[in-house]
Amino acid sequence: MVPHSMGGLITRSFLHRHRPKTLGRVVMLGTPNHGSEVADFLARNAAYRWFYGPAGQELITGRVPLPEIGDICDYELGIIAGTRTIDPVSSMIMRRPNDGKVSVESTRMAGMKEQLILPVSHTFMPQNPVVQAAVIRFLQTGSFHQIDEPSPISAADAPDGG
């Protein structure tokens, strides 16, 4: 499974409730596992609330995790986070580094196997050839790491331990 953005939250919910017996590896692309500062900023805006509905309110940072999506990963999970933005306004209200929609910090998840941080934007992450190659590598080998390149952040290296 390779979900992007909020698709990762939907994937977490599905896997928490209906885990397939033969689940392979999962790679999340820019998933706001701990919300988005953009949602914090826009949460009171009527147009934002209308367009995104209740799902947009769930993206507010600091909210209690929804029990139906689980808060700890117990499957092989690789996370790719971006550090480029095409929207300088949203990037100014966010923790750095970020991809213009989600901070790198918010993509992390307890129990993740590895995190790879790349200079890509949130919107175009799925189309990026480097991201695509990294996804294939993780799905095939369980690691973003190649012998001839520096190791990505592993769960043990993450500031919150995963």
Image (cartoon, rainbow, N blue to C red):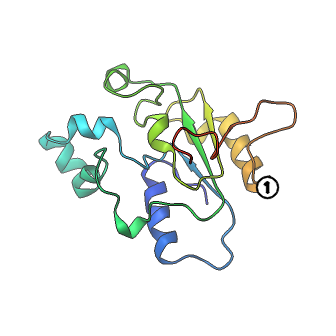
Q: Is residue 17 above or below residue 146?
A: below
Q: Quadrant of residue 40?
A: top left
Task: Give the residue type at disc 1.
Answer: Gln
Residue indicated by mark 1: 140
Q: Nearer the viewer, residue 142 or 137?
A: 142
Q: Quadrant of residue 125?
A: top right
Measured as percent of width and height from the top left, residue 19 is found at 56, 76
Q: Classify residue 137 as left or right of residue 47.
A: right
- Residue shown at the point (36%, 45%) measured from the top left: 35
Q: Is residue 40 above or below residue 19?
A: above
Q: Is residue 42 above or below residue 161?
A: above
- Residue shown at the point (69%, 66%) measured from the top left: 24
Q: Nearer the viewer, residue 59 or 113?
A: 113
Secondary structure category for the residue under label 1? helix
- Residue shown at the point (49%, 63%) measured from the top left: 11
Measured as percent of width and height from the top left, residue 52 is found at 26, 50
Q: Residues within 10 Å of mark 1 (few under 14, many from 20)?
A: few
Q: Quadrant of residue 1?
A: bottom right
- Residue shown at the point (44%, 41%) measured from the top left: 106
Total numbered badges shown on the rendered structure? 1
Q: Classify residue 112 as left or right of residue 24.
A: left
Q: Is residue 154 above or below residue 96?
A: below
Q: Nearer the viewer, residue 51 or 68?
A: 68
